[in-house]
Image (cartoon, rainbow, N blue to C red):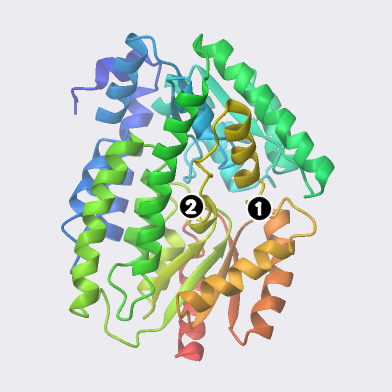
Amino acid sequence: MATPYDAMWEQLNLDLDAHAGLLQVLGKFYGDIYLSQSGRLKGMEYVDFVISEIHGLRIKELQEAKAQGKKVIGTFCIFVPEEIVLAADAIQVGLCAGAEAGTDAAEKVLPRNTCALIKSFVGFKLSKLCPFIESCDLVVGETTCDGKKKAYEIFADYAPVYVMEIPQMKNACDRQLWRTEVLRFKDQIEKVTGNEITAAKLRQAIHLVNDRRRVLQRLGQLRASDPAPISGRDALLINQIGFYDDPARFTQNIGKLCDELDERVKTKSGIAPEKTPRLMLSGCPMAIPNWKLPYVVESSGAVIVGEESCVGARNNRDLVDETGASLDELIDALIDRYMRIDCACFTPNQERLDNVVTMAKDLKADGVIHYGLSFCQPYAIEAFKVEGALKKAEIPMLSIETDYGMEDVEQLKTRVEAFVEMVR
């Protein structure tokens, strides 16, 4: 069926037939997992609209911005400082993909035992399925894992790629390395956009991104209520679209949704009955449309009350200090904030262990499900340390390793149901 966006997608060199098939499958998937829920917030209509137009109206906005001279910067990781991009009057969008589409193409250039997230974003590019990737003037990678680091070398054959080096420890010398990388990134963004980053522009950008973090923090705090006022699926979706949508528009609409949540909390009106088992997800990020595990959990008699992941608390836990007067002071504030990210790439990583336990307690979680993507070594190995920290706090944990395929849904459901019964 023809759409108003076909000409735009064709101009972006998408495979129109394959792309139409992808959207059809995702539309049904979304309906089954999200629109089938009862008692959803009115504010979720905005989120549903963003998802329905994610490859349409949002891409049209990006093309219009490009026509006016703006640059679009694509990223795969929360380590890339969006404030720098916005301060150069550019737009930043997330590029991680959470579907198996394009796997066959990806496996022609990547080993089969590469994690699903890497295969997905490479596959989406090679199969010409992602209008976000095709809209980018620059794609920014980072060295958070060996798989990504080497995949960017292949990706660079098909798109303009710039890679930031992420420190692996948090000593003074590592902070200095990160400062050098942030300044190098600033220079690159100024070169790509042709715009100078000033203290005033950077301060404004920091405030804009902090406002988005604040509204997501507010959402997280409201989820501590019992009964839970919003499903984990819907909260995850909100976090996911925060990587794609205009930041000011997103903050305004999620603020209204949080007002609605406030009323629910006051009237003790929940998405599930009081005393429903409360579970927290921890571990690998979940990119759109990776909704399999949240659906399994919430159709097994539990409610998800938080996500300790890059698509969750790790992305919005800390704010950047906005009080710096000079450009150097503001950049130092950026560096300090981003060095507090507790990615599993760091060693040692006591910060993450402490944050997992604190978050589980704050959200009154009855248990934690640690989610690892198959072949993601950093999170898979760190799961043992996380389980030990939670055990000391007397919080049970279930460790799950899976990919984007649907073949293991019944097996996952059996394990999750048993865990729910145990914590109940």
What residue is disc 1 on?
343
- How many badges with numbers are in the image? 2
**Residue 280 to residue 336: above or below:** below
- Residue at position x 18%, y 22% in the image: 4
**Residue 69 quadrant:** top left
**Who is closer to the viewer here, 406 or 339?**
339
One can see residue 361 in this view = yes
**Who is closer to the viewer here, 328 or 168?**
328
Inspect the image, locate mark 1, and give the three-letter code of the amino acid beneath it.
Answer: Cys
Instruction: Give the label on residue 316, or none.
Output: 2
Left or right of residue 219, residue 110 in this image = right
Q: Position of residue 186 (x, y in %)?
A: 61, 22
Q: Where is residue 375 in the image (x, y as percent from the top left)?
A: 69, 53
**Residue 33 to residue 153: above or below:** below
One can see residue 24 in this view = no
Q: Position of residue 341 (x, y in %)?
A: 62, 51
Left or right of residue 93, residue 123 in this image = right
**Residue 235 to residue 104: above or below:** below
Mark closest to the chain's N terminus, 1 or 2: 2
Q: Callout 1: 10 Å neighbours few (<14), some, many (20+)? A: many
Inspect the image, locate mark 2, and give the three-letter code of the amino acid beneath it.
Answer: Asn
